[in-house]
Amino acid sequence: MTGTKTAPAATGARSGAVPTGVRRLVNRLLAILVALVVWHLFALGPGASSDFPTPPASFRTAVDLAGTGAYWSNIATSVETALLGLALAVLVGLPVGLLIGANEHARRSTQLLLDFGRTVPAIALLPLFLLLFGATRDLGLVLILVSAVWPIIIQTSYAVGEISPQLRRVGRAYHLTRWHLLRHLIAPSMFPFVFVGLRIAATLSLLMAISSEFLGGSDGLGYVLLQAMQINDTERAFVYSFTAAILGLLLNLVFVLLQRRVLWWHPSVRKGGAA
């Protein structure tokens, strides 16, 4: 039609536009830079009287510690304790959650017990466990089990209880065995919820492992952190604390990647909801 102007076709990205991934990376780097500047100014100002270490001093200490075998040995000890405790929590929590979730009466009768158990801080039981197990790895494993088993039980029981009745009827209509019912109907429906519980439990496992080493005196990051604090070595104490924080981030990242790998078909993963 004469005189009619057509709008230019929309392009996928405007010329010169910065990709979303690059913008996200730049924003995160800027946030880290701001945090380092604030840390440095605080160390030179209000924190100077308490020997608060500056970022350069902490970095030099971290480089020195990274060159020693004891540093990596303590990291390995803490991570191994956390993973062993997490494995115990999974071995106990998954079956218990399945049994509770499969029965409506069991879910209602155990709700108060689960709510009570998850609110009791495991550290409050440390004196009792210390008398029973001493300053050993067993102390850390028990603390991890007591703290990390609850999110796994709760998420698993909730996931099983929320399975659609239509799916259950389909299973009965096709005369599926309990194994096939668990594998093809229950597991795909409950895994997204279970992975949430696993990520929470993994964080609690590392926290309890380091706490048991710090308070109980067994080998690991917590113990060397306690030693650094006792001799007022703030630089080493900061490095050990940041090491624990980085381990927590890495552990969470591992479970995020595992969730994406296992649940690649789930909408929450395809849309980036697992990140």
Image (cartoon, rainbow, N blue to C red):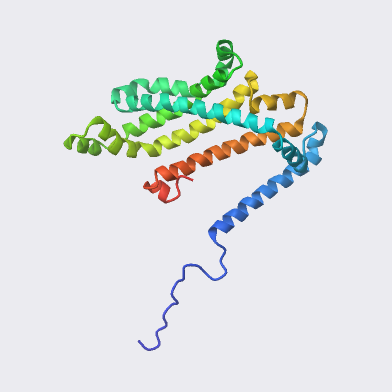
Which residue ends up furthest to the top in the rendered image? 131
Q: Position of residue 270 (x, y in %)?
A: 41, 50
Side (left or right) of 142 relative to 186: right
Is residue 163 shown to the viewer in this render? no
Depth check: give the residue in front, 267 or 136: 136
Which residue ends up furthest to the front in the rendered image? 69
Tell me the quarter of the picture where residue 82 sits: top right
Side (left or right) of 18 relative to 105: right
Vertical position of residue 254 compared to residue 149: above or below: below
* Residue drawn at point x = 21 percent, y = 36 percent: 171
Is residue 75 shown to the viewer in this render? yes
Vertical position of residue 78 compared to residue 37: above or below: above
Side (left or right) of 133 relative to 97: right
Which residue ends up furthest to the bottom in the rendered image? 2
* Residue drawn at point x = 29 percent, y = 26 percent: 104
* Residue drawn at point x = 61 percent, y = 53 percent: 27
Tell me the quarter of the picture where residue 212 sits: top right
Q: How many marks?
A: 0
* Residue drawn at point x = 58 percent, y = 17 percent: 126
Q: Position of residue 213 (x, y in %)?
A: 62, 23
Tell me the quarter of the picture where residue 95 sits: top left
Q: Quarter holding the N terminus?
A: bottom left
Q: Position of residue 196 (x, y in %)?
A: 44, 36
Depth check: give the residue in front, 164 or 148: 148
Q: Position of residue 44 (x, y in %)?
A: 81, 41
